[in-house]
Amino acid sequence: MKEFLERIKESKKLKIAVLSLLCAVAVLIYFLPVESSNRENVSISNNTEQKISNEEKLEAVLSNIKGAGNVRVMITYESLGEVICANTTETQTNTVTEKSENGSVKESETVVENKAPVTIGSGNGENPLVILEKEPEIKGVIVVAQGADNINVRINLQKAVETVLQVSPNQVEIFTMN
């Protein structure tokens, strides 16, 4: 193992390979599904929990970058996410025909549309069928790391955040931890 670490220190290609592997792991961790016990009521608290979870995942990955040390992450969002559920639509059409004394016919049509969510499960365990879940849009990311005073560590942290969160460089700020 020690020889492997020495080879990594000496070889630029191995450094790039290890960094790429770390970024791939970060992407994999970020996109793992987040379980939710009840999707019926998508609330602000669920979004807050997911945001904290994303920050914790990112902190764990970034702290594994060589020289980063202890890392803290804060992600701000432009908007809340959106959950779109499947709905059933029932349409009822009623046509009323009226005849007047002079022989003219007047028809009026009333359309009533009822929408209800499609649910899965039975009894109290019913949950709506989610067909699309949009992630909240990221506004900015702050990373505070012990090793951020080193320019190479700072660049690696920047690139990892950009890759994992698919954000532009101007949305990411890296600071040195005191």
Image (cartoon, rainbow, N blue to C red):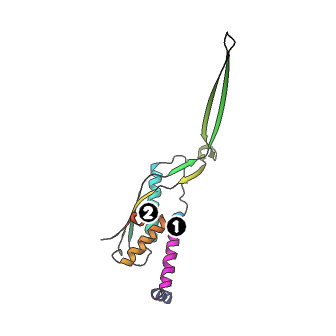
Q: SS for tag 2?
A: helix
* Quarter of image, res 101: top right
Residue 19 part of the magenta segment: yes
Residue 176 in the image: state x and y as whole percent: 33, 71
Instruction: Report the residue at 51% width, 76% height from top.
Output: 20
Where 133 falls versus 19 (above or below)? above
Question: Number of callouts in the render?
Answer: 2
Residue at the outermost top position:
101
Q: SS for tag 1?
A: helix
Residue 148 in the image: state x and y as whole percent: 35, 74
Residue 158 part of the magenta segment: no
Q: Is residue 127 visible?
A: yes
Residue 97 in the image: state x and y as whole percent: 68, 19
Where 117 falls versus 3 (above or below)? above
Where 94 falls versus 63 (above or below)? above
Secondary structure that dominates the magenta span: helix
Question: Which badge, 2 or 1, comes first in the chain's sequence?
Answer: 1
State how far apart marks 2 and 1 are (Cα): 11 Å
Q: Return the residue at label 1.
A: 29
Q: Return the residue at label 2.
A: 55
Q: Quadrant of the C terminus?
A: bottom left
Q: Which residues are magenta?
A: 10-27
* Quarter of image, res 113: top right
Instruction: Report the residue at 42% width, 78% height from top.
Output: 66
* Amino acid at dot 1: Ile
Residue at the outermost right position:
103
